[in-house]
Amino acid sequence: MTWVPLWTDALLYLLLAALAALVLYARRQEHLRRPWRRVVRSRVAMVSLVILAAFSTVGLLDSLHFRAPDSGEVLSLFDRLATPLRTHMEKTYSAPFATHLYSREWFVVEGRRIWTYPRLRYGGAHLRDPAEKWPDIARTTAIGALKGLAVWCLAFLTVALARRGRPPRDFPWKTVAATVAGLSICAFAVAGLSLKYHVLGTDKVGEDVLYQSLKSIRTGLVLGTLTTLVMLPFAIALGVLAGYFRGWVDDVIQYLYTTLNSIPGVLLIAAAILMLQVYMATHAESFTSVAVRADLRLFFLCLILGVTSWTGLCRLLRAETLKLREMEYVQAARALGVSHGRILVRHIVPNLFHIVLISVVLDFSSLVLAEAVLAYVNIGVDPTTYSWGNMINSARLELAREPVVWWTLAAAFLFMFSFVLAANLFADVVRDAFDPRRAEENG
Amino acid sequence: MTAYLLRRLLNAVPILIGVNFITFVLFFVVNPPDAMARMQLGQKYVTQEAIEQWKHAHGYDLPLLYNDRAEGTARFTRTIFFQKSVNLFLFRFGRSDSGRDIGADIRQRMWPSLAIAVPTLLLGLAVNITCALLLVFFRRTYLEWSGLALCVGLMSISALFYIIAGQYLFGKLMKLVPISGYDTGLAAIKFVILPVTVGVVSGIGSGVRWYRTLFLEEIEKDYVRTARAKGLSEPRVLFGHVFQNALIPILTGVVTILPLLFMGNLLMESFFSIPGLGSYTIEAIQRQDFAIVRAMVFLGSVLYIAGLILTDISYTLVDPRVRLQ
């Protein structure tokens, strides 16, 4: 088993490390700890954080790729964990929890040809009589829920023992514990069910929709976070320089972002993606595996989304820097002969932190949503990449079928909605906590 | 005022040149004319002769940026960059790579775009502002809390789902309106209703929250306290004073949508198969017709800049304190 480091994997883990470093740094800074304490006290924020953490865990597990020794395929750790889901391919559509295929076929039974729905290869295949389906589902769910509860109890006891003797903080323990319990029960129940049935049905080529939805988490996560990683250096460096030095530097930077801003974003993205396609077509020899190609396109999409989205933050930072550079303490530092570089690093940038943070958390969900739209216009992620956008795109025409195939759409909706909703709720609390104007009114 | 406008218009020129240069780099330097010709003529079995012929027919047979075979200024003017740019600046869009007249296409397709975009914009503004004012009016009540929660929920749904759900519910199940298509004249109304409704509804979540923050910011100010102290009723304060004073930030917000008015909403038009500029652009992207995309990028940035200037003018109409110099 050899690891295959993809670009986006490496960057995603780099981002995680940066985040951890930032948390360690912020712990020691009182002015950063105070707003974070408000976030931690908020019930909504903590529940969303737990849900986001669950999504991120799946996404991060899905970001450890290796080459399978037997087949030579590039798989992720998550693929390995979800192997039954990945390999349980049916012939074509089947509804959630179905035991039979969604379309009829000719069969020869006892010498007669009959036109009927065939049994599924995997979904409910262990049942001797399909009529036993619902009792079996209930039993499996109950067993899964019990397992989930047991795991939760174990975790709860560990945490409770570890925290014994420490003074209680105003952390919403009960809410968090209840959310974790709910998530763990659901996860175990669904995991148990998915071994026997297709919980969210199968798509046109018979692939499990639950597996697709879970795989799509990584794409959303990568786009939401890496784009920010690409955008931040541009936005911070240019915004601060423009605001601090003014004069011709300001003029040039303003010209740069007005120009970029006045190009319709979708067109810029479309143009860039078309270019990438042409480049890949002419340099086919460098992109041998499908996974590498798809990954490069995802990475490139992050790059180009980053290039188109730094202008807004840059403008905000420029305005704030213009204000900060006139503050007494900056003037004093300058009068004392502190160098420009030192003033920027020690006095200006740390005081812009809240703006950066607010805009990062607010952008996250809109980037996840944008992915779906871009996929529709064919300029999003590679069609072979699992993403909610691609799922919606392929499911769109299935609504026109008779009878309607609704579950792919419903699954994409369910996953995307809960992911984006959690992100939005969390972002709201973070914004309220860090925005100085709002911080005053809420105390 | 005139001097100010003149300066703004002159300022726009370098920006447009920049836009043009970026698109030029993207379309020609990264992807040279030979590759374009090969793509338009079909990838395989293309002779060099056919490529040269195609390039000549579409005016791509010149050097990109510098012509070393020409004399004097022609060294710079007899190039693809100059030829194509000058025509764009004169709004002569020429022929698309597949041979259509882009200018005529745009003139014909801008009306359906406007028919969708203008009602969506105006209705959206009316609905969002009313809801936001209501939320502010009922602030610190459960009504506000549930309204905000609803907004976050609406915001978290992808625009695609609004379109799909709208088409499925009203088009397929209830059969109230046709699912997609377009017609000329007044017959277009029944094709326009659904896209406009979907457009308005999908914008409510973020729109209402945005306007609410604007109003809340305004409501903190001294004149509002004075108005209340004078004994004005809360609705009078809100709808009379606060609304009027929040108009400037509202106008600024509207500008960002202005280019969309002409570009049309890419998604809406293509989902509801409305023959507007948005679907035109998407088709061009999918057919890889660079001449059209380039023309649309240029047009889009011209409209964006025009929108910025228009906002400045409208400021003076809304707020007498603003003077343009």
Image (cartoon, coloured by chain):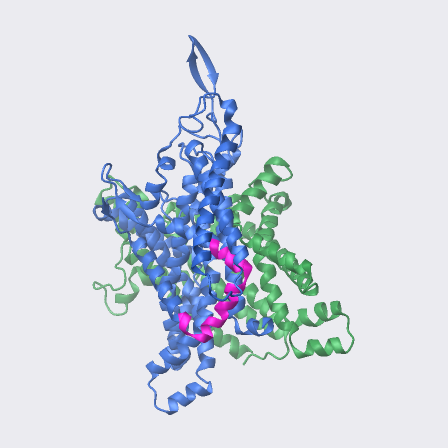
Observer-nearest of A275 and B152: B152
Judge whether A330 appears above or below B250 on screen.
Answer: below
Q: Quadrant of residue B176?
A: top right
Residue B107 appears anywhere in the view: no
**What percent of the width, then of the height, locates residue B81?**
32, 61
For the N terminus of chain B, which image quadrant?
Answer: bottom right
The hue of chain A in the figure is blue
Q: How many marks?
A: 0
Q: Quadrant of the C terminus of chain B?
A: bottom right
Could you tell me residue A251's position as x and y percent? 40, 77
| Secondary structure mostly taken by the magenta-highlighted segment of the chain | helix
Magenta residues span A26-50
Identify which residue, B114 or B131, lies in the foreground.
B131
The answer to whether residue A359 is seen in the rendering is yes
Q: Is residue B144 magenta?
A: no
Residue occupying image coordinates x 36% and y 72%: A237
Q: Which of the two residues, A367 or A34, is positioned nearer the viewer here?
A: A34
Q: Residue furthest bottom?
A: A335
As drawn, the chain in green is B
As drawn, is B224 to the left or to the right of A342? right
* Residue B9 x %, y %: 48, 72
Residue drawn at the location 57% of the way across and 42% of the way down? B165
Pick the residue in front: A373 or A410: A410
